[in-house]
Amino acid sequence: MYLLWKTLHIMSFFLAFGFFMAPNLFALVALRSRDGAAIRRTVEGAKIFDRLGGMSVGLGVIFGIVTALTGEISLLSGWLVTAYIMLALIIIVGEGIVAPRLRRVAAAIGEQGTLNPEAEALIRSSGLSVLILIPPLLFLTVVYVMVNKPFA
Ligand code: HEM
């Protein structure tokens, strides 16, 4: 059973990575294209992936906890606490900072889909081109933590 839970845990987080990261990376491409309509469409299209990503994270955490319990691994071991903190950071940066900033840019672009000066200024001051890359890098770091188990 242990291997089954672990497999489901890894599959869930793979799905979460895809659901969260693909739309954000597309948004980065759209932002760089300076094409207002493309930016709006990408941000609108990301909403469903945000929801699916959230569900996958929920499943991943549940399967992770079940894996730990069936493998007699302490839920308070250093590497797991590190993972909780990093997962919280992923959610704070991704959902608390990146997503609202993208939505603000999309709202400034508006129905007509042109990159007006307000949207331009928001993109320039938002730091999005760097912020968008933080959650995927943190995700990769959690994989390192899971496999190598530092601070055992
Ligand atoms: C936050 C809650 C999490 C919990 C409770 C959790 C729990 C666990 C447990 C108990 C194992 C089994 C370790 C072993 O077999 O030695 C494991 C393995 C693994 N987890 Fe997590 N995990 C969490 C988050 C994550 C995240 C966010 C990712 C991906 C980004 C991830 C990816 C992996 C991978 C790739 C393995 C396989 C490591 C190996 O077998 O060497 N986990 N996890």
Image: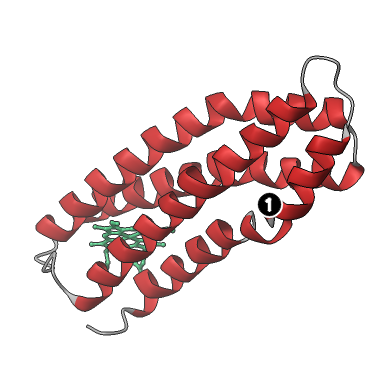
Left or right of 44 on screen, residue 99:
left
| Res 117 → quadrant | top right
| Res 47 → quadrant | top right
Extreme residue toward the top, this view: 111
Residue 73, horizontal then vertical, whole percent: 13, 68
Instruction: Give the residue type that dot 1 points to.
Output: Ser
Residue 12, horizontal then vertical, whole percent: 40, 43
Extreme residue toward the bottom, this view: 151
| Res 77 → quadrant | bottom left
Left or right of 119 on screen, residue 16:
left
Does residue 66 sit above or below 113 in this rendering?
A: below
Q: Quadrant for ligand 1?
A: bottom left
Q: Which residue is mark 1?
A: 126
Does residue 54 sit above or below 76 in this rendering?
A: above
Can residue 25 be seen here? The reply is yes
> What's the residue at 29%, 54% (across, down)?
6
> What's the residue at 23%, 69% (across, down)?
81
> What's the residue at 73%, 54% (across, down)?
125
